[in-house]
Amino acid sequence: MSLHIIRHDITKMKIDAIVNAANSSLLGGGGVDGAIHHAAGPGLLKECMTLGGCDTGDAKITGAYNLPCKYVIHTVGPVWHGGQYGEKELLRSCYIKSLELAKANGCESVAFPLISSGVYGYPKDQALRVAMDAISDFLLTWDMTVYMVIFDKAAVTISQKLFSDIKQYIDQAYVEESEVKYSRNRILAEMSTSAPVQYCKAIKPEKSLEDIIGEIDESFSQMLLRKIDELGMTDAECYKKANIDRKLFSKIRGDVNYKPSKPTAIAFAVALQLNLKETEELLKKAGFALSRSNKFDLIIRYFISNGNYNIHEINEALFAFDQNLLG
Ligand code: AR6
């Protein structure tokens, strides 16, 4: 179970079901609808002709014909009229109805295009928000792997304000970093002209290596499980909030020395709503740190220091800045 944003052509995806952004006739059109019919071949249109159309906000399922997936779920998004005409509810309904159909047909993996965000004119940042919220709500109660497929880079736009806030945060951190480097270089330059360094005698360690290893700190998985208990969370609440697969979570639970990837470790910090200091502590357990000199780390810092722990919003921002995603 997890939700991923990926850049891809949906017609090429080898999964259980892909969703088509259709119109109410279900008889084909342009955009992703045209691409799906083209790749599926005439059999798809023939089956669609038997369905009697589809209401806005509703969904219907067909076979996939020449496509590499098993099913096509056709949903009809709302046309954008400014946002006061129930567009949001209708768009949300497209995602929920499509996911329910997928569930009823035993699908374990589904891919969505950004419905309504092309010909139907829904603002892309808002369309993505509705999509991510609807899908993540559904995933709270049902296990499935869901992909939000973004066709062209321009289609992913987090809100302009968020984008410029993060950009400013990154730029500011880069400025601070170069100031630190500058003063460090100055100190080094001054040191090289001052008195020679005094060497001291090697100090004999007081503890044996065995003793030191015996005092090894709590591991990543121990700290994670302790935090989950302290917060009174269930395991499922935690891995769902972290956008982490149940299987991966069981692996971590069962292996005291499990070494997660950095995005996985951060995903847990976000799920546990750790502050920056605690996040650094958890990351350190897995051998990682949050630096001030790369975009990925700065975006994470930005969200954590603003108390925003919505993993999907963080992933949207990471995606918009071309970074690896969490979870
Ligand atoms: N894979 C993934 N996404 C795609 C692909 C692709 N191959 N091709 C386009 N997109 P649109 P709508 C993205 O216009 O706004 C049709 O004529 C595209 O970049 O296909 O719901 C129907 O028949 C955009 O972000 O769908 C309806 O009449 C997104 O898919 C009407 O358009 C949706 O754009 C539906 O309009």
Image (spheres, helix red, strand yellow):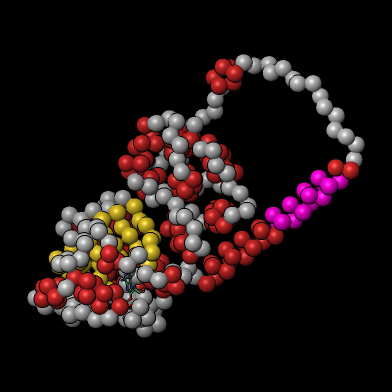
Which residue occupies the foreground of this view, 119 or 85? 119
Q: What residue is shown at x 75% (from left), y 21% (from top)?
A: 202
Q: What residue is shown at x 49% (from left), y 45% (from top)?
A: 262
Q: What residue is shown at x 63% (from left), y 52% (from top)?
A: 292
Q: What residue is shown at x 85% (from left), y 42% (from top)?
A: 192
Q: Identify the residue at the far left of this view.
A: 50
Which quadrant holds residue 53?
Answer: bottom left
Which residue occupies the foreground of this view, 49 or 76? 49
Q: In the rendered image of this protein, does residue 136 appear above or below residue 119?
A: above
Which residue occupies the foreground of this view, 275 or 296? 296
Residue 5 seen in the current view: yes
Which range is magenta? 176-191
How far from the left and from the top, in percent, is residue 27? Answer: 17, 80
Residue 186 in magenta? yes
Which quadrant holds residue 94?
Answer: bottom left
Residue 89 seen in the current view: no
Q: In the rendered image of this protein, does residue 141 appear above or below residue 228?
A: below
Which residue occupies the foreground of this view, 13 or 75? 13
Q: In the rendered image of this protein, does residue 129 appear above or below residue 303?
A: below
Q: Give the total number of marks visible in the rendering.
A: 0
Instruction: Please state if 80 lies on the left or on the right of 283 as rendered.
Output: left
How far from the left and from the top, in percent, is residue 324? Answer: 47, 55
How far from the left and from the top, in percent, is residue 213? Answer: 55, 21
Instruction: Please state if 65 lies on the left or on the right of 248 as rendered.
Output: left
How far from the left and from the top, in percent, is residue 221? Answer: 45, 34
Residue 249 in magenta? no
Q: Identify the residue at the far bottom of this view.
A: 81
- Mostly what secondary structure, the magenta segment? helix
Q: In the rendered image of this protein, does residue 326 appear above or below residue 88?
A: above
Ligand 1 lies in quarter? bottom left
